[in-house]
Image (spheres, rainbow, N blue to C red):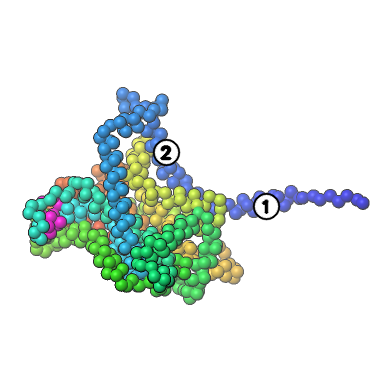
Amino acid sequence: MAETSFTYPSVTVASARTTRARRWVPIVVLLFPALSFLAVFFALPALGLVVFSFLTQSPQGTAGLPLTLSHYVHFFGTPLYAHVLWTTLRISLVTTALAMVLAYPIALVMARSSGAARQVITMIVIAPLIVSVVVRTYGWEVILGNGPTGVLNWLLLASGLIRKPVALLYSETAVVIGSLHVFFPMMVLPLASALGKIDPRVEDAARTLGATGWRTFLRVTVPLRRHRGDDARNAGRSADPRGLRLALRRDRGDRARRDRAGGQHRRDPPAGSSSEGGTAMSGRLSGPAAWLLYPITLAMMLFILAPLLVTMAISVSDSAYVEFPPHGFTLSWYGKVLSDSDFIDSLIFSAGLAVGATSGALLLGMPAAFAVVRHEFPGRGAVSAALLSPLVFPVLITGVALLQMFATMRSNNTVLNLLIAHVLVTTPYVVRTVAASLMLVDPTLEEAARTLGASNSRVFRRITLPQIAPGLTAGALFAFMISFDNFPISLWLADAQHNPVPLLIFQMIASVFEPSVAAISTLMIVLSMAIVLIVERVAGLRRAMAM
C-alpha cells in the first residue's frame, strides 16, 4: 500500500502570522501616542528621581557615582525627618479612618436615593474634586481662624461654649480637617457605586428572617459591597469587554435603538435600577436608619460646602479686611479684581494653558480609551493601569520629577514645560470618561452601518462619535477645569512671567488681607460649579465619573 504524505503549505503559517500582525496594528497605533508620552514624561522622570536619590553629592553640589545609601541613612537618622514622617503617617491614618466611617452613610444615601436628590448629593460630593485646593484652603483658613473673627471661634463665642478664642489654625487638627475635606469624595464615590449595585431585596429578606438593621448591614451589605467592589476592580483586568458590552446591551439595548436617530445623549438607568448591570435596585431608606443617616448626610454636605460658602460670603463684605460675620454688601472687590492687570494676565494665561492641555489630553486619551475598550490583548489590564497612573501618583512628586528632568534637559521654555505637565495630569480624566461612554455604545449600530457599506471612518463619524459625544464633552470639561485649577504642578514649573491663577491666589493669601482674595476665589468656585452643572446636563455626573 502506497504511503501517503501530508504537506503543510508555508503559506498557511505566513497567513496566520500576517493576520496576527494586522490585529496588533490598530492597537499599537491607538496606544502608542499615550503610552510613549507617559513613558517619556511620567515613568522616566520618576525613575530619574529614584536614581538621583542614590547618587553621591560632591562638595561642589554635583551628583554622580558611586551609588550610595547615605541620603536614606541621613533621612531616617535625622529626628526632624522621622518626626515629620510619623506625623504625616498619623494624619493619613486618622483621615482615612474618619473618611471611612463618615463615607458609608453618605454613600448609602446616594445609592438609595433617586432623581434630583441623588444628583444634588453627587454634585456636592464632587465639588471638592473640582474646586482648586488653594481656594478650599483659603476657605478653611477663614473658618479655623485663631482670632474672634474666625468662623468657628465666632460661633463658639456666640454660643457661650468658650470665653476666649481657641487656637485651631496651624495645628494637626486643622490639617486633618482640610485633608478630610479633600479626600472624603474619593471614599464616597466608589462606595456609592458599589452599594448601588446591591439588590435591596436581599437586605429585606434578611430583615424578614429576623435580622436587625446592624446585623443586616454587617452580614449582608458589607460583604456584598466587598464582592461588588472586587467585580469592579476585576472587570478591567480579566473580564471580556465583549461580554460586558453584551450585558450592558441587555439592559440598555432598547433605549440605545430609540436614541440612534439623535445620538447617545443620556442613557441613565431608570429609577429603581442600578447604573451598571441592571440587577440591582434603589431601595428607599426608612425607619430608624433614615433618622440616623439623613442627619449625618446633611451635616457632611454642610462640611463639604462650608469653605466655599464662607469664601463667597466674605467676597461681598464691605469691610476692609477679612472678618466673620461679614458686614454690609458690596461688589467693589469684584470690580477691583477685574481691573487688576496681574489677575487678568494670570486669567488669560491659565485659560490658554487649560485649552492647550485639554486638546492634548483629548488627542492622547481618546485613542487610548478606544484601544482598551474595543480590543482584547495581553496586558490590557496593565495598560489600563498605566494610563490612569498619574491619578494615583502624588502630584507634588510628579512636579518635582518633571522639574528635575527639565532642568537636566536645560529646557527653559516655561509654557511648554507647563503644557506637558498639565497634559500629563489631565489625560487620565479623558481616558476614564471616554471609556465609560464606549462601554455604553451599542455595537449593533456600528455593525449595521458596516453591513450597509459604510467605511470605518464613516461609521466613526456618523455612528460612534455622536454616541460618545457626551462622555467626550464631559472629559474635555473635566480636563479643562483640572488644568485651570492645578496648583502643585504650577508651583514647581511656573515663573514670574507665567503665573497661573491658583499660584496668584496662593501668593496673595500671604500678603493681602482684604476680601479681594475671596472675590478671586469665588470666581473660581463659580466657574467650577458651572462646569459641574454642564457635565451633569450633558452626560450625567455618575457616568462622567465612571460610577
Q: Earlier in the sequence, mark 2 or mark 1?
A: 1
In the rendering, at what x and y percent does residue 95 appear?
A: 29, 51
As drawn, 530 above or below 262: above
Q: In this orientation, which residue lies closer to the viewer: 224 or 32? A: 224
In the rendering, at what x and y percent does residue 526 appear?
A: 25, 62
- Range drawn in magenta: 145-156
Task: Specify whether 131 is left or right of 219.
Answer: left
Which residue is painted at 14% across and 57% down in the image? 151
Residue, far left: 163
Residue 152 shown in magenta: yes
Q: Is residue 538 visible?
A: no
As drawn, 166 above or below 470: above
Q: In this orientation, which residue lies closer to the viewer: 281 or 14? A: 281
Give the crowd class for mark 2: few <14, some 14-19, many >=20 residues within 10 Å: few
Residue at label 2?
Answer: 47
Give the crowd class for mark 1: few <14, some 14-19, many >=20 residues within 10 Å: few
Residue 36 shown in magenta: no
Q: Amino acid at mark 2?
A: Leu
Q: In this orientation, which residue lies closer to the viewer: 455 or 92? A: 92
Task: Specify whether 394 is left or right of 243.
Answer: left
Residue 138 numbered mark, or none: none
Q: Amino acid at mark 1?
A: Ala
Residue at label 1?
Answer: 16
Residue 332 image-quadrant placement: bottom left
Disc 2 and disc 1: Cα gap in Å?
39 Å
Which residue is painted at 50% across and 54% down in the image? 237
Q: Secondary structure at mark 1?
A: helix
In the rendering, at what x and y percent does residue 429 appear?
A: 39, 56
Q: Is residue 327 visible?
A: yes
Q: Secondary structure at mark 2?
A: helix
In the rendering, at what x and y percent does residue 471 appear?
A: 42, 63
Which residue is painted at 34% across and 64% down in the image? 214
